[in-house]
Amino acid sequence: MVTKFKSILKRTPWSLVAKAAATGVAWLLFPFWVSAVLVLWWYFVPPFRVVVFGGHCLALLSLMWILGSLGQTPLEAVVIGAAFFLLVGVKDLIFISREALHTLLTFSLLFFVYAGFSSMADVLGAWSGGAIAFFLALLLAFLMCMGFFRYRFPELPMSHVVTLSGLIVLIVAELGTALLFSPIEAWARTALLFAATFVCLEWGREYLHGHVTSARVVRYSLSFLALLVLLFGITEWVP
C-alpha cells in the first residue's frame, strides 16, 4: 500500500497543481486581471495546441469574470482551479487518460458557463442584458463544441466541424430562447440547456463514429423529455 501511494505521488504533476492553486487563490483574493494574466501566461507557455483549446480557455476566462461579478466564494475558486488544472493538463499532454478528461473539462465548463450566464440573465432581465448574456453563452458553447470535435476528430475537415457545431448550437439556441423568457428558475434553465447540449454532442460524436442507431436516438430523446417534464414539474414559477 505504501509503495502504491508513493507511485501515485510520483505521477502527480505537482507543478500543475501549484499553478492551479495559484490561479484559484489569485482569483479569490486579487482583481480579475491578475488571475487572467496567470491563466493566459501558463496557457500560452508553451505555445502548444493553443488554437484547439482556445474556446475552452476563453470559456474559463469568461467563467472567472462572471463568477467574480456575482460574488466570489472559496468553492468557486476551487472550481476555477480545477478547470484550469484539467485544461492545461490535457492541452500539454500531462495526463495519460486525456480523452476522458477532455470530455469532463468540456461538459464541466459548459455547465458552469450556462449556470453563470443564467444567473446573470435573471439579474439583468431577459429583455435587456439577459439576452446579450445568453448570446455570449451560445458563442462560448459554439467555440467549445468546435474544440471538442476538433480534438476528438483531428482528420475531420474544418467545414464539417463548423457545420456540426453550428447545428448543435442552433438547436440549443431555440430551446434557450424559449427558456430565457419562461418564468422558471435559473437552475432549471441551466439543467435543460446543459442536457440539450450533452445530448447533441453525444449524437454528434456517435454520428462521426458511425454508431448512431434509431434505438439510441429514441433513448436520448425520451430521457431529455422526461427531464424536461420533471424540471417543469418541480421548479417554482417566478414572475
Image (cartoon, helix red, strand yellow):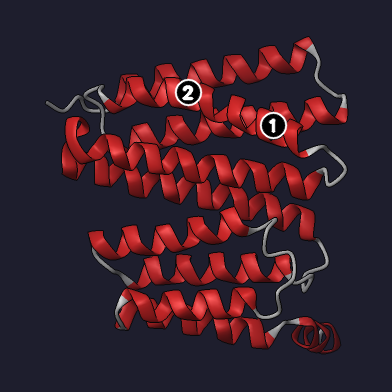
Q: Amino acid at mark 1?
A: Glu
Q: Is residue 80 left or right of residue 211?
A: left
Which residue: 81% across, 61% down? 97
Residue 205: image quadrant is top right
The quadrant of the rendering that contains the N terminus is: bottom right
Which residue: 62% across, 41% down? 145
Q: Is residue 178 left or right of residue 212?
A: left
Q: Which mark is residue 202?
A: 1
Which residue: 47% across, 23% down? 227
Secondary-structure class at tag 2: helix
Relative to the observer, which residue lies in front, 105 or 237? 105
Q: What is the x, y in percent for residue 104?
A: 64, 52
Residue 112 higher or lower than 179, as above or below: below
The quadrant of the rendering that contains the C terminus is: top left
Mark 2–mark 1 distance (CA, rounded to whole Å): 17 Å
Residue 204 higher or lower than 80, as above or below: above
Residue placed furthest toward the front: 159
Q: What is the x, y in percent for residue 168?
A: 59, 28
Residue 12 higher or lower than 121, as above or below: below
According to the picture, the residue beneath numbered tag 2 turns out to be 227
Label 1 neighbour load within 10 Å: few <14, some 14-19, many 20+:
some
Relative to the observer, which residue lies in front, 66 or 217? 66
Which residue: 41% across, 16% down? 229
Q: What is the x, y in percent for residue 84?
A: 56, 69
Q: How many marks?
A: 2
